[in-house]
């Protein structure tokens, strides 16, 4: 006599098998285990024989083994690729891991002393991500409409041929890119005010699929307001990177957003290869010219600190930057007298970009003539290349193209090494 509880189990199993036959993609492993649990198969066989349903048993077992051989098709979550790895190698501020149908981006250092990290899931259409990622901001990719908030974001869009996706930007006059300026002139990119108080009404009306923002510290009310109004914000910490290739590698974030990760990787690899090749060329140099940097702004002389991005490029180009031993990643603020005492006889002077000629420098401060580099006309500037509205191209493009910056500086310091090369950013002032 079969216990009543076993009849109930068999009935429940029968209903389950019918259900399994109707739906697709349920794991056969579960079915296989149930059919082979102690006493179940024998019980089911007896039950079916007693009620002339032997054919049901054969069908059920056949279905179970068929599903077992076919494997489990999971439609609730895309499987994680076992070989997935972080595709970011130089940047310290983010990681990027690609899986089948989606990419996980983690921004862990968007500004100095950040107190938390930010995770974003960039997923393709109809892809369902694992439950463990549901808590994070999800962005549908490839994006078609974007807002960026720093000119350093513009080159990535242009290199990926996605500048037409840009619909809004704060302080449009700052943009130098000719292609983007043409779009601005055509009215296709809207003015959003300034970063600290973006025009939220215009921004909401534009309905971008993502806003690429940045912050200076842990307090970002403007970004918080955007998210509160349903806009999706992705933080970009390229400005906080302290290495040349680390800054440039953020193009991979934009590659993932546009579904062009392979293209972004190729672009970065070309930049990396060119940069490293220049390092090899300059490695054999023994003599290092002394360098003065910066100039006076509002009564103070600003020049890069020893751990800054700019200082590292000067070192990489085999230049003897006179403040290379200072600590910090920002700028020093010094008096004219302090700078004159230390750098009066510097061989090369690389200015901040305020001036386009030696005359402009003299008009600004006649005391500049006390420096040897000024007297010998060894003063260089990147102020020559500007956009239609006065934006300096160097500030926009240089962080994305360290290969060009390094070659420019090497050409300035060691012109014999790069025969035939014409500097892209730097020009000797006349």
Image (spheres, rainbow, N blue to C red):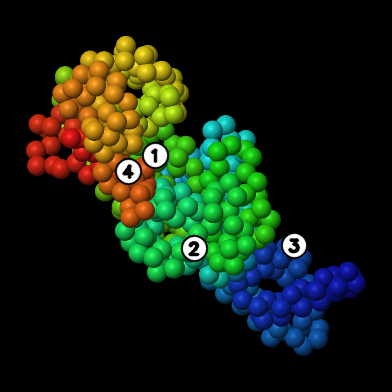
Q: Which residue is mark 4?
A: 394
The one of 318 and 34 positioned closer to us in this rendering? 318
Quadrant location of the C terminus in the rendered image: top left
Residue position marked by numbered label 2 in the rendering: 190
Q: Is residue 271 above or below residue 29?
A: above
Q: Is residue 85 left or right of residue 8?
A: left
Which residue is the site of mark 3? Answer: 38
- CA–CA distance in space, label 3 to label 2: 70 Å
Q: Tell me which numbered mark, 3 or 4, is placed earlier along the sequence.
A: 3
**Mark 4–mark 2 contact, CB under 8 Å?**
no
Which is closer to the viewer, label 2 or label 1? 2
Element at label 1: helix
Question: How far apart are the alpha carbons under marks 4 and 2?
Answer: 23 Å
* Residue 46 relative to residue 116: left or right: right
Considering the numbered disc 2 on the image, is that residue within a helix, a strand or a loop?
strand
State the residue in front, 112 or 131.
112
Q: Which residue is located at x 35 percent, y 64 percent?
A: 182
The correct choice, above or below, for 366 with respect to 85 in the image is above
Tell me the mark number nearer the camera, choosing from 1 and 4: 4
Q: CA distance from mark 3 to mark 1?
A: 59 Å
Q: CA distance from mark 1 to mark 4?
A: 17 Å
Residue 362 figure quarter: top left
SS at badge 4:
helix
Quarter of the image holding residue 134?
bottom right
Mark found first going from the N terminus, 4 or 2? 2
């Amino acid at each position: 006599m079969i216990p009543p509880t076993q009849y109930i189990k068999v009935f429940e199993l029968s209903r389950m098998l019918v259900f399994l036959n109707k739906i697709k993609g349920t794991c056969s492993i579960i079915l296989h285990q149930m059919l082979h649990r102690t006493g179940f198969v024998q019980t089911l066989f007896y039950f079916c024989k007693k009620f002339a349903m032997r054919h049901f048993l054969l069908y059920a077992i056949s279905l179970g083994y068929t599903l077992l051989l076919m494997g489990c098709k999971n439609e609730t979550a895309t499987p994680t690729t076992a070989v997935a790895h972080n595709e970011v190698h130089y940047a310290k501020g983010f990681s990027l891991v690609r899986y089948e149908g989606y990419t996980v981006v983690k921004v862990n250092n968007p500004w100095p002393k950040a107190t938390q990290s930010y995770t974003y899931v960039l997923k393709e259409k109809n892809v369902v991500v694992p439950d463990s990622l549901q808590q994070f901001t999800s962005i549908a990719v490839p994006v078609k409409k974007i807002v960026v908030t720093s000119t350093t974001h513009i080159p990535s869009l242009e290199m990926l041929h996605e500048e037409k996706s840009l619909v809004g930007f704060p302080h449009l006059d700052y943009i130098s890119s000719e292609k983007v300026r043409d779009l601005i002139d055509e009215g296709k990119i809207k003015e959003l005010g300034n970063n600290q108080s973006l025009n939220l009404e215009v921004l909401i009306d534009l309905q971008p699929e993502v806003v690429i923002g940045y912050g200076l510290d842990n307090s970002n009310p403007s970004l918080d307001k955007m998210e509160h109004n349903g806009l999706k914000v992705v933080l970009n910490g390229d400005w906080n990177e302290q290495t040349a290739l680390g800054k440039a590698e953020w193009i991979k974030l934009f590659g993932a957003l546009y579904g062009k990760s392979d293209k972004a990787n190729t672009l970065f690899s070309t930049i990396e290869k060119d940069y490293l090749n220049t390092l090899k060329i300059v490695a054999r140099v023994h003599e290092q010219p002394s360098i003065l940097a910066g100039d006076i702004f509002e009564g103070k002389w600003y020049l890069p600190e020893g751990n800054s991005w700019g200082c590292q490029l000067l070192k990489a180009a085999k230049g003897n930057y006179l403040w290379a031993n200072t600590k910090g990643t920002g700028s020093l603020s010094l008096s004219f007298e302090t700078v004159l005492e230390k750098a009066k006889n510097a061989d090369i002077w690389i200015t901040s970009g305020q001036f386009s000629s030696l005359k402009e420098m003299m008009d600004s401060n006649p005391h500049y003539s006390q420096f040897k580099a000024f007297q010998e006309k060894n003063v260089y500037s990147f102020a020559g290349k500007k956009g239609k509205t006065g934006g300096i191209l160097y500030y926009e493009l240089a962080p994305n193209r360290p290969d060009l910056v390094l070659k420019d500086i090497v050409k300035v310091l060691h012109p014999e090494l790069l025969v035939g090369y014409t500097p892209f950013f730097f020009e000797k002032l006349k």
